[in-house]
Amino acid sequence: MSTLDLFEGLHTPTQAMEPLAQQACVLRGFALPFVEAVLPALAHICEVAPFRHMVTPGGFSMSVALTNCGHLGWTSDRSGYRYSPIDPTSGQPWPELPSAFLALATAAAKAAGFPDFVPDACLINQYQPGSRMSLHQDKDEHDYTWPIISVSLGIPATFLFGGHHRADKPQRVPLFHGDVVVWGGKDRLRYHGVAPIKEALHSVMGAQRINFTFRKAG
Ligand code: SIN
Ligand code: FE2
């Protein structure tokens, strides 16, 4: 029996699903049954590929620290944003996508109506109080037919879910430990971001928010 099979059936069909748009939703608490398996795998990734503050092409250091796992990792430097199979800090491939991560991503995608989604990249963001992410589109991936699966752990955040133009007023969506947001199809290129994180303490994660975004990048 594979790890994927073990996770099968952990979810109640009564899962709370909140629509954000036609092909975007919040799956409240969806990640909770996976957390116990995900956290040790995350700790391993952080040893091999520690969180770092990347520099944007404009020369600013991001307030969010990040790392990656999976075949491809998202990176930024003065010359631009790109996906790379190599961690620029270590010169080594990014850590593999752990089976618990894969199980979570594929189950969430399926629950949100994207049954064939298999990620090849997982960007891991670490937010401290005060960290924020300004409105942007995820458009460095090769094929926009695949959704983005975003998992929140730790202290709360206000997710900003906008429209197809930067100036469109975003919905403000409170996100808590274990929540998953999925956006795909006609909503795949909506602008989104995270409001400055407020001081808080989470019993398991401490004073931080961790976000995974699973993508099919290549
Ligand atoms: C992202 O857009 O990459 C991160 C979203 C989040 O942290 O919720
Ligand atoms: Fe994003």
Image: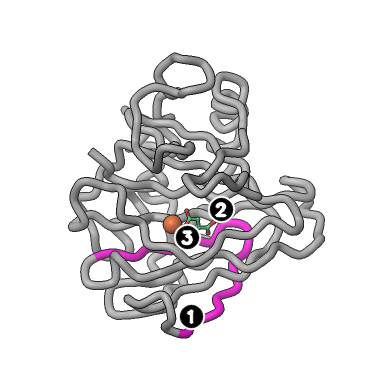
- Check disc 1 and report its element: helix, strand or loop: loop
Q: Is residue 181 magenta?
A: yes
Q: Position of residue 124 (x, y in %)?
A: 52, 42
The reply to whether the C-beta atoms of the residues labelled 2 and 3 are less than 8 Å apart is no
Q: Which residue is mark 1?
A: 170
Q: Position of residue 104 (x, y in %)?
A: 41, 46
Q: CA distance from mark 2 to mark 3?
A: 10 Å
Q: Amino acid at mark 2?
A: Leu
How many residues crowd mark 1 within 10 Å: few (<14), some (14–19), many (20+)? some
Q: Amino acid at mark 3?
A: Val
Q: Which residue is mark 3?
A: 180
- Check disc 2 and report its element: helix, strand or loop: helix
How many residues crowd mark 2 within 10 Å: few (<14), some (14–19), many (20+)? some
- Nearer the viewer's eye, disc 1 or disc 2? 1
Q: CA distance from mark 1 to mark 3?
A: 18 Å
Q: Is residue 6 magenta?
A: no
